[in-house]
Amino acid sequence: MQLSFIIPHKGRFEMLIETIESIINQQTSEHSFEVIVVSQTAEIKECILTTSDKLELKVFIRPVEDTISSSRNFGVEQAQGEYLAFLDADIYLSANWVEQMFSELLGSPERIIVSAMQVCNADAPPLEQIRTSLSNVEIDQDVAFLPGRNLFMSKASFKKIGGFPEHLVTCEDYYFTDQAAKLGKLYYTSLANYRHIGEDKEFNAMFKKEIWRGQSNIQSLAGRKIPLRELPSFFVPPAILFLLIAAVVCLLSGWPELAMISLVLALLPIVVYSSRLFILAQSKVQLVPILWFYMVYFPARAIGTFAGLFKTIKVK
């Protein structure tokens, strides 16, 4: 059976090369595969030319204004494989990824998409460990959502789902896997894994990227039913930002009591979310970095959500 890897790309050549190397290192003899790189960087061909003699590699250059969904859908149009693997251009797969993905998908007729578990190095910075722990809250079970950086499915299923939503700049994986979940089960396995090379490692950079990631929150609601479990992700960030602003305004206005009440109310969900993650991570990450993570994450998401209503946010 043939598999087509589809990798949207923009900049950061060294990470893309590592991603392709992890595909070359796959331990499989039963399956053939091709790699389709859909790039928005014209200089890419020279960068990855040395890898083209080790596997079937196709490179396409697309307009810079295309969304990641557009790149993925374009890649599918060029794909020859019966099965599709969607990877971000900064993902390093475990050597058994291909074999295990086929095993997980074909092992249950109810499954429509499968994905592998995220891992990080033992000496990874706290922020990367937090991100990894958040990705692994639900393991070896059916889930409601899968991140777009690591997806495996049949081409027939992709066509039934209808492709990625090209009108969304971000949150496209929420929308896509939500549509997929209406047709079959999403499964997250620990028997294969990947390392997110480009994972957030510094809080300053994370703040900017979360503003960018949050810009399509509202747009992603259109055309799908929102489950109760998702509602906090839409209401909690703006509520916290509003309360923090209210605390500052009250303090400057000479109302210290109201400022304190607003601050406590803003910190309450941060403490709750942090305690939950600390327990789920089994104390592998210290509580203070987790608290700091949510103090950065929620305001950034809220800013991105509001800003996305008025303009498209660019990120380098």
Image: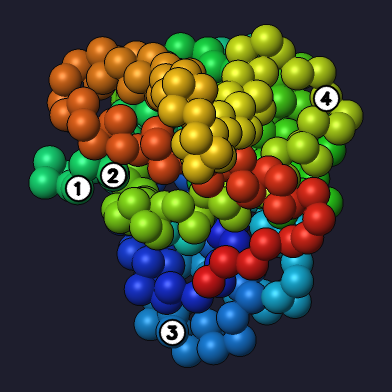
Give SS at disc 2. Answer: helix
Q: Position of residue 26 (x, y in %)?
A: 34, 50
User: Residue 128's mark?
Assistant: 2
Instruction: State the separation of the CA atoms marked 3 and 4.
Output: 40 Å
| Residue assigned mark 1 | 125
Query: Residues at badges 1 and 2 in contact (C-beta under 8 Å)?
Result: yes
Under mark 3, the amino acid is Cys
Few, some or many C-alpha atoms within 10 Å of disc 3 (few <14, some 14-19, many ≥20)?
A: few
Mark 3 or mark 2, which has the lower sequence index? 3
| 19 vs 177: above or below | below
Instruction: State the separation of the CA atoms marked 3 and 2.
Output: 27 Å
| Residue assigned mark 4 | 224
Q: Marks 3 and 4: which is nearer the front?
A: 4
Mark 2 or mark 4, which has the lower sequence index? 2
Under mark 4, the amino acid is Arg
User: Residue 76's mark?
Assistant: none
| Residue assigned mark 3 | 47
In the current view of this chain or complex, which residue is farthest to the left? 123
Assign the N terminus to one quadrant of the image. top right
Is any part of residue 221 visible from this angle?
yes
Q: Is residue 229 left or right of residue 156?
A: left
Few, some or many C-alpha atoms within 10 Å of disc 1 (few <14, some 14-19, many ≥20)?
A: some
Mark 4 or mark 1, which has the lower sequence index? 1
Q: Marks 1 and 3: which is nearer the front?
A: 1
Instruction: State the separation of the CA atoms marked 1 and 3.
Output: 29 Å
Closer to the camera in the image, 39 or 309: 309
Instruction: State the separation of the CA atoms marked 2 and 4.
Output: 31 Å
Under mark 1, the amino acid is Pro
